[in-house]
Image: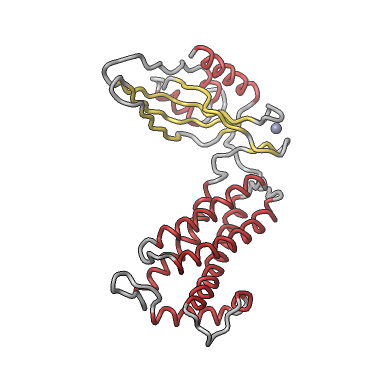
Amino acid sequence: MNGYCDVYKHSGKIGPAAYMIPAAGIISAIVLSFIYAYITVYSPVPGYISIIFVLVFALSLGFVISKVCFWGKCRNQVFLNVSSFLIGTFALYFSWIVFIYALFNQNGNTEIELRIFRMFISPGVVWDLIQSTNETGWYSILSWTPSGSALWTFWGIEAIIIVAVPLIISSKVIDSEMFCEKCSDWCVSVEALNLAIPDDDELLKEIKKGDAESLADLDRAPEAEYSYISVVLQYIRVALYYCNGCNVTAGYKLKHVTKKTGNEEKEKEKIENITGLFVLPHDSFEKLSDLSNRQDYDS
Ligand SMILES: [Zn+2]
């Protein structure tokens, strides 16, 4: 045992993401709401297929938030989750407004004068219009026009997807990333090195706890040889993280790889994380990256 590496934790700083995420989130929610609402109203095939539109809407929103999270250098998971939740809720509300606007205009309803901004500041009016749309239903699948509780159920599922999907995406996005506070930039990661799983269970336990010194002493993973029968290899893969700016901030993560290889079949890899992200002291980082360079050179 040579001492364990610390588990990496984000600093909690929000950075420029403090204004970038809300701004980009609201703008993209507005744009996507228009696209989503008009496609929903004017789609020649309404019904079950609209689940795809909802998913694309929610995934696009999550994608924008996660990209801007990187550009804005957000290292605060709570801020990210709260922002995603609020943006998702805003997107849900705004998409309802545009949907009602598009639907009532399509039907040529002249009794109610609708303006998007006025609806936005009058949630009570929006709610009344949602309820009246629910009573009659607005589309038919074959000869069935969903209304009442059936339609509420569909709308409930839709609402959950729009709010939950961006939240799920953003709850994962900085999970396996490392940030160099000195250079104020994200670290890069490389799947650096394949090492043999030690026979000694105790040693394996130490390594999983973050014993980087012992890790560097492991043998290299066995290479697959050309074979007519399928061969299953198992080994540890080291993912190295390092800062391109200073080359000092570094970390690593271990994965368990099961690789199936053989003449007849395509190579298959099953990869499973076996540790979180550890902070790597500079000398251990040099040792491991030297090893990985040698492995690259040999293979
Ligand atoms: Zn750095």
Q: Height in image: 148 above or below 272?
A: below
Viewer-side residue, 15 vs 44: 44
Residue placed furthest toward the top: 298
Viewer-side residue, 64 vs 69: 64
Viewer-side residue, 83 vs 236: 83
Evaluate whether residue 5 shows in this view.
no
> In which quarter of the view is residue 61 placed?
bottom right
Q: Residue drawn at (58%, 39%), measured in percent from left and top?
A: 177
Evaluate whether residue 233 shows in this view.
yes
Left or right, 296 with respect to 245, comes to left
Q: Quadrant of ligand 1?
A: top right
Number of dots carrying numbers? 0
Residue placed furthest toward the right: 182
Q: Residue drawn at (41%, 33%), measured in percent from left and top?
A: 271
- Render colour scheme: secondary structure
Q: Residue drawn at (54%, 85%), measured in percent from left and top?
A: 112
Q: Height in image: 131 above or below 74?
A: below
Q: Height in image: 270 above or below 172?
A: above
Residue placed furthest toward the left: 229
> In which quarter of the view is residue 283 placed?
top right
Left or right, 247 with respect to 224, comes to right
The picture places residue 135, in percent across and down from the top left corner, at 39, 82
The picture places residue 242, in percent across and down from the top left corner, at 63, 30
> In which quarter of the view is residue 291 placed?
top right
The picture places residue 75, in percent across and down from the top left corner, at 64, 46
Q: Residue drawn at (58%, 49%), measured in percent from left and top?
A: 66
Q: Height in image: 51 above or below 212?
A: below
The picture places residue 168, in percent across and down from the top left corner, at 49, 53
